[in-house]
């Protein structure tokens, strides 16, 4: 059995760890509330944006836009969106495994796959395991639509210039605090906007556009990519802080259980020490009485 001094040292170390995990849980909870609010506030905008874009697409020939061009997908790029920091359970591990599996399947099909990392954890993992063409780290502390526009603009022109044929975005979709689902979205070529809309003519919104429908579509399609990327950033931010909050809550409970277990061992060790001292006293007393 460990000595009483060793057990006390372990209890002190676990108590300090508990203080750290509890503080991290509180910080993550505060950040999560703000991130969740931003994500939920953006959803109505994204939904209405899609309504307007689909209505516009019904009026024009969408296949004339270069972002909708379908080519033989020989060269593929993948945006992997992870967090910048750890201590958030399996948030990054699950996403990285999904990205690895997706890239491996594409390589088996004979595709040339290149990776774009957003987030430090993905950068660190894929640094020597994939063809990384660009990376962005330390971006989730504070970001806005400018970051999404920058990421999207870095991939729009190369696609139009036919430097690659398909682009996929892999990120964790926020479901709830305990569940973040790895999701694969094809960004380029863009889905057939307006072709899957089944709305009766009397219920369809009729918008008046200025300038022409074609010119407006040229402007809105890149914005559509910006919206998708920004949504993924918001989902990642909310999911990361939710996962860290749950992870630190579990760690705090584990610390409490460990402290309880160590306290029981410490009490047993103290009782054993007291019993040993009593035995020594009794033995000494008996020796003196016989003498």
Image: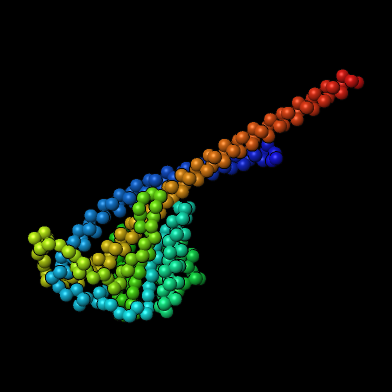
Residue 158 picture quarter: bottom left
Say which quadrant the N terminus sits in.
Answer: top right
Say which quadrant the C terminus sits in.
Answer: top right
**Viewer can see residue 53:** no
Q: Position of residue 91 (x, y in %)?
A: 44, 56
**Viewer can see residue 253:** yes
The one of 42 and 153 positioned closer to us in this rendering:
42
The number of numbered discs placed on residues in the rendered structure image is 0
Residue 46 picture quarter: bottom left
Q: Position of residue 226 (x, y in %)?
A: 28, 65
Work out whether 283 lies above or below 50.
above
Left or right: 119 in relation to 166:
right
Which coloring applies here? rainbow
What residue do we see at 76% from left, 26% from top? 278
Work out whether 112 lies above or below 175.
below
Left or right: 199 in relation to 86:
left
What residue do we see at 31% from left, 63% from top? 229
Left or right: 213 in relation to 9:
left
Which residue is most to the right?
A: 291
Q: Position of residue 149 (x, y in %)?
A: 29, 65
What residue do we see at 33% from left, 66% from top? 185
Residue 58 picture quarter: bottom left
Work out whether 69 lies above or below 275.
below
Left or right: 165 in relation to 257:
left
Which residue is most to the top?
A: 289
Q: Position of residue 96 (x, y in %)?
A: 45, 63
Work out whether 74 lies above or below 16.
below
What residue do we see at 33% from left, 50% from top? 36
The one of 1 and 46 positioned closer to us in this rendering:
1
């Amino acid at each position: 059995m460990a000595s009483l001094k060793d057990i006390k040292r372990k209890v002190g170390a676990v108590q300090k760890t508990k203080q750290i995990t509890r503080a991290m849980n509180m910080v993550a909870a505060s950040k999560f509330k703000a991130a969740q609010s931003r994500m939920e506030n953006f959803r109505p905008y994204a939904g209405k944006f899609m309504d307007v874009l689909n209505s516009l697409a019904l009026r024009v020939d969408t296949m004339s836009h270069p972002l909708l061009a379908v080519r033989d997908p020989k060269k593929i790029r993948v945006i992997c969106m992870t967090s910048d920091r750890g201590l958030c359970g399996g948030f990054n591990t699950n996403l990285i495994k999904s990205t690895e599996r997706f890239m491996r399947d594409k390589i088996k099909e004979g595709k040339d796959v290149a990776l774009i990392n957003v987030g430090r954890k993905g950068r660190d993992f894929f640094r020597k395991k994939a063809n990384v063409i660009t990376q962005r780290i330390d971006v989730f502390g504070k970001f806005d639509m400018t970051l999404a526009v920058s990421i999207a603009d870095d991939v729009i022109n190369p696609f139009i210039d036919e430097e690659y044929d398909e682009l996929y975005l892999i990120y964790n979709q926020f479901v709830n605090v305990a569940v973040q689902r790895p999701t694969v979205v094809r960004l380029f070529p863009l889905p057939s906007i307006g072709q899957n809309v089944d709305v009766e003519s009397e219920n369809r919104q009729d918008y008046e556009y200025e300038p022409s429908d074609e010119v407006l579509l040229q402007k809105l399609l890149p914005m559509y990519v910006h919206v998708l990327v920004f949504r993924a950033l918001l989902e990642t931010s909310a999911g990361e802080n939710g996962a860290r909050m749950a992870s630190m809550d579990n760690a705090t409970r584990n610390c409490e259980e460990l402290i309880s277990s160590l306290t029981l061992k410490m009490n047993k060790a103290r009782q054993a020490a007291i019993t040993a001292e009593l035995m020594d006293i009794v033995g000494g007393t008996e020796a003196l009485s016989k003498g």
